[in-house]
Image (cartoon, rainbow, N blue to C red):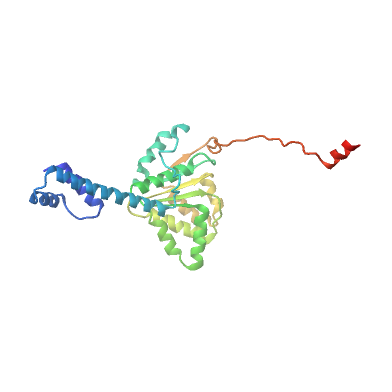
Amino acid sequence: MNSDIISSLGNSLDVLKMKITEQEIADYMIEREFSDLQMQAVSEVFAEFAARKEEASVNFLLKCSRLPMKNPKTFENFDFSELSGKGLEKLKGITTLAPLYAHKNLAFIGPAGTGKTHLAMAFGYECCRRMLKTYFIKMTELNDMFTEARKYGRENRVISSLVKPSCLVIDEVGYCNFDTENTRLFFDMIDRRYNKEGNFNIIFTSNKQPKFWKQCFAEEDTLKCAMDRIFDDVMIFNFSGSSHRGQKREAFNLTTKKVQTVTDSIQEIE
């Protein structure tokens, strides 16, 4: 009896949510006198089923995450060689998703075009590939979501939906102003995620340093409580330098031919 085949088959059955122990698999095959070749064939069939199920699950998580499916931003297509500095190795280390397992938030701060959103999306994309629920939202969309929730009395439902994902990505902090009620909802969301169990974190991107975020919220005391929780355990990556965007830009100078005007025609006649 090949133990490696039994173990592989057991892993496939776990993915397929079939509650069968490796001992039960072995007993079944011994009872029916399966050869190693037959066992291998059965293992390969279930491995294929398991792979298809995992692929479908990942695609579903990506679809629900609101991350771009077309031309996705991943760690594989991020050019780390364009960056330098003492924190580069720490930045590369987030590809393991260690911050999420350590309940450590991430903040990518810096000017436009330096890779902040790409990295945030890449982290979320990797979470989905590892079967961890992710949700991506821009700060302006979050503000609108809170306003809409208040309009229809759905505040608790909306907050709960933002607490559930393992990884919550909030992009472009500082591009809109939260009124008093929305600031309180923002704190409620942060507080509930702060006390959440399991593997989780929040990722923020912004052109503004955190000390300036208060300019975008109406109730400073409430925001301070939220910020205390956000930055209680966090890795902050400050980016600087020129934008990576526009590298494919092409510019062409063209001149039109001179068109004969009515004045030109009269001058020729004279």
**Above or below, comparing residue 155 to residue 221 in the picture:** below
- Name the side, left or right, on which 216 lies relative to 101: right
Q: Name the spot of residue 10 as percent of width and height, x first.
A: 19, 49
**Above or below, comparing residue 240 to residue 160 in the picture:** above
Q: Name the spot of residue 182 as percent of width and height, x first.
A: 51, 59
Q: Quadrant of the N terminus?
A: top left
**Residue at horizontal 84%, vertical 42%?**
262
Outermost residue, right side? 270
Q: Quadrant of the C terminus?
A: top right
- Name the side, left or right, on which 9 lies relative to 147: left
Q: Name the spot of residue 114 as percent of width and height, x first.
A: 51, 39
Say which of 101 and 211 sits in front.
101
**Residue at horizontal 17%, vertical 42%?**
4
Q: Name the spot of residue 169 as percent of width and height, x first.
A: 44, 50
In which quadrant of the rendered view does residue 255 lie? top right
**Residue at horizontal 22%, vertical 48%?**
45
Can you see residue 204? yes
Outermost residue, front side? 269
Say which of 237 and 126 sits in front.
126
Say which of 29 and 112 sits in front.
29
**Residue at horizontal 76%, vertical 36%?**
258
Can you see residue 131? no
- Name the side, left or right, on which 256 lies relative to 27: right
Exactly how many numbered labels are in the figure? 0
Say which of 253 and 76 sits in front.
253
